[in-house]
Image: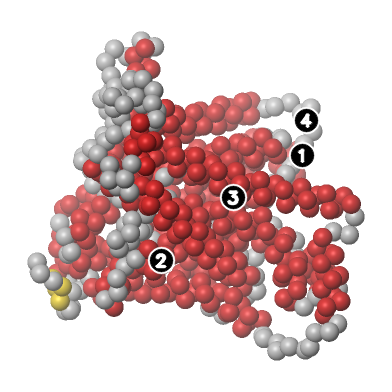
Amino acid sequence: MSASQQSVGVALERRAFARPRLRLSPRVVSWLQVGPLGIILVAFFALPTLLFLVVSFYDYDRTGIYPAFILDNYRDLLTTPATMRVYVSSLKFAFIVWGITLFLGFNIAYFLVFHVRSSLVRTVLFLLCAIPFWTSGLIRTIAWIPFLGRNGAFNQTLMELHLIEEPLEFLLFSDFAVVITYVHLFTLLMVGPIANSLSKIDPALLEAARDAGASRWRTMVDVVIPLSKTGIALGSILVFTQVMGDFFVVKQMSGGQSASIVSALATEIQAMQYPPASASAMILVLFVALLVGGMMRIVDVRKELVR
Amino acid sequence: MMGAIGTRSRDPREKRPWTFYALASLCGLFLLFLYGPMLVVYLLSFQGPNGGVTFPMVGFSLTWFRDIFEPGQMANIPVAFGRSLALAGVVSLLTIVISVAAGLGFRRPFPGSGVIFYLAVASLVMPSLLVGFGVGLGFQFFDWQPDLFTSALAAQLTWTLPFGLFAMFAVFNRFNRSYEEAATDLGASAWQRLVHVTLPILLPGIIGVGLGAFTLSYDEFARTTLVIGTRNTLPLEIYALVSSSSSPTLFAIGTLTTAVSFLVIGVAITVILRMQRRRAANAQRS
């Protein structure tokens, strides 16, 4: 008899003396259970977002902000060439990083789930991938500085191997450094959801595909990828939104060559220019919502998750 | 996320295909990429007293670790560290309770479930600095003072709760409902079924959720920075240090926080393994 069965047995004896209780309908029970989550999300996420919307129409000057309904904040924002530039640059980073992390994440997850035979080795490998995630992201970002710098570990190694004569300059404080840091920070966000999806696939399906004469490539395209699309979508959403919402990496690693959407916004917040900052926030929120909404139209994440 | 790993046995005599070796090398290279810069940080944190933030190492010392604990020398790291631990503890506890409850609620269809689901998705993907900005604006609107366990806690929950909810979906997906049906057939009430059957079976997953929420909170920077008030958490102190100075002290902090993370993970994994072993032993006895 297992522990849970024993406790059910004990529970049964107690039940004999229990009085009949108030019965709630299942719907009410669900509401009570989900209620705290709903209240917190409404109070600290939905209402503040509404507040942006309201404040984004306010007027402001150097001394304060004034309730109004003007569209100047949006007009200023959308007519500044800097806005376009920063969105294009962030999108560029987002697409590059998405491509790299998807490739790495899918292959690593596939390797862990289907190729590693011992479950101990699999757990150890998975933990090895996850452990750096437990170090502060700020420190993981600046960790690249002594590694990529002019006299950094990477350049020194290459010079000692006589692969290069002069230290490579493009490694640090460049777009290259930004992409490297993002990939370092976010690949795990791809591995996790994809591994979760892949581990639900019955290996018999793959054998069946092989027995039916499908090549490795066809099995991958026709069986594995369609069955793991929820994980791919979730990972993509996470990586994409992390890059679009980044505030530290571009600032620290690009050497001032490019700005991110949020770091431009943070400058306005620090200057207490809340109305233009709110307008900029609203545009970013809309943009991210459209992106995520688009991805969720392609893959019905909800149907797969809530069962 | 450990729950993501299923167990799968196959004939060990089967020959490895070439893809195995290709993917194994990719995995190895990725691990090298993952750990390379981290090792540099760990190494440089033991830099000699006259050394700088890059190679070469000038001797070997614990100077930079001592620096962390010297009050007045720089931002008060130990105090900020204590605050971060306290906040992360509260965040993970709340996340466990609220997301387990919500996960249970989502197992049956109820009106409004779609709204809550998409609210959680939106909250998860919201650019993090904006969450802090919004909560901060709200506090200003009511003329409340932002602080560690009010506004900062709230801003962090908008991130850990959706994470907890999605993790609970994954946990419940793997849960075999026939245990619950068996309990009901044996006459257990809904509450008894929950406390004696469902929660004990899900416990490893629930610990995983708590651990995840803890680390999300412990590292959180962008959501917290605008709503922290006057009592900084560790990531905020680190941020101040990154922008103001460059000394190996930062690396020493990195090494130290990694050591703490290892400790927390180690304890959690030991607990989970013990639990599984005890369960296996119980199952064998019966």
Residue at the farthest left position: A62
Q: Is residue A99 left or right of residue B285?
A: left
**What residue sits 77% from the left and 89% below the top?**
A20
Sequence-first tag of 4 and 2: 4
Depth check, mark 3 against mark 4: the one in front is 3
- Chain letter of disc 3? B
Task: Point out the tag, 3 or 1, that comes first from the N-terminus.
Answer: 3
| Dots 3, 1 in contact, CB < 8 A | no
Q: Chain of mark 4?
A: B
Can residue B41 be seen by looking at this rendering? yes
In the depicted structure, whether residue A296 falls above or below residue B7: below
**Marked residue chain, label 1:** B
The part of the image, by quadrant, that contains residue A2 is bottom right
Q: Which mark is residue B149?
A: 2
Q: Which residue is mark 4?
A: B12
Crowd tier of the residue under label 4, counting other residues whose Cα lies within 10 Å: few below 14, some 14–19, many 20 or above: few
User: In the rendering, which numbered label is found on residue B9?
Assistant: 1
User: Identity of the amino acid at label 3?
Assistant: Met
Q: Choose top left, top right, bottom left or bottom right for residue A213.
A: top right
Q: Is residue B227 above or below residue B66?
A: below
